[in-house]
Image (cartoon, rainbow, N blue to C red):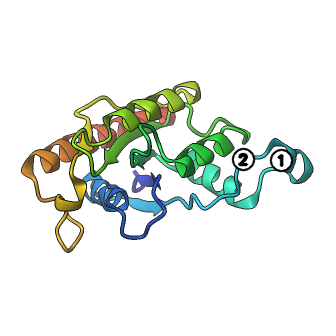
Amino acid sequence: MDELKLAGLCGSLRADSVNRKLMMEAARHFGPSRFEAGDLRLPLYDGDLQSREGVPAPVRALADLVAGADAVVVVTPEYNQSISGVLKNALDWISRTEGSPWKMKPVALLSATAGRAGGARANYALRLCMAPFRPLVVPGPEVLVAGAAKEFDEAGRLTDPRYVGALEEHMALLRETALARRRMAET
């Protein structure tokens, strides 16, 4: 069996964001795989642009990344009690591409924030945004890292054993789901 391919989408564009660190930790805990982070630096969704020029190449590349992955980790900060505009824009664009790249795709939804709820509202909003795409969103344990600036060491590793344990369990479930989907596709 070929190595699993894991894709990551991070709703924060900052290179040193806690959400990017959480995405990288998730990839590490997922286990052996080919990991690739998607580029969410996309033009704002514009139906006129799409009608005039079609789906932009960076959007097509992102949709192809999702479609070609065995599993996807989506990580979002909480901005104004919801997901980031960057992530929402990417989801809107991907929804305009052919082939339903999210359909039945094993997906993990994670969040890291400065607040004490760890992005619970953003995570819920992300679940609502993803519902029309019909992915296989793996159930808990939810990984909602609160006070996230203090939860990562200098190497970008999570330090709190509760978060580490929840992330390990969540990524193990994502991996099991991806392997089960692959086996089903091969039969």
- Name which of mark 2 and mark 1 comes first in the sequence: 2
Q: Which residue sits at x=73%, y=39%?
A: 98
- Pick the front one: 13 or 8: 13
Q: What type is the residue that disc 2 sits on?
A: Tyr
User: Can you tell which mark lies on residue 158?
Assistant: none
Q: Mark 2 and 1 residues: CB-CB less than 8 Å, in contact?
A: yes
The quarter of the displayed image where residue 100 is located: top right
Q: Is residue 184 left or right of residue 43?
A: left
- The percent coordinates of residue 46 (x first, y second) are 78, 46
Q: Which residue sits at x=40%, y=51%?
A: 1
User: Can you tell which mark lies on residue 50?
Assistant: 1
User: Can you tell which mark lies on residue 45?
Assistant: 2
Q: Is residue 93 left or right of residue 157?
A: right
For discs 2 and 1, the disc positioned in front in the rendered view: 2
Q: Which residue sits at x=60%, y=62%?
A: 41
Image position of 56 with respect to 118: above or below: below
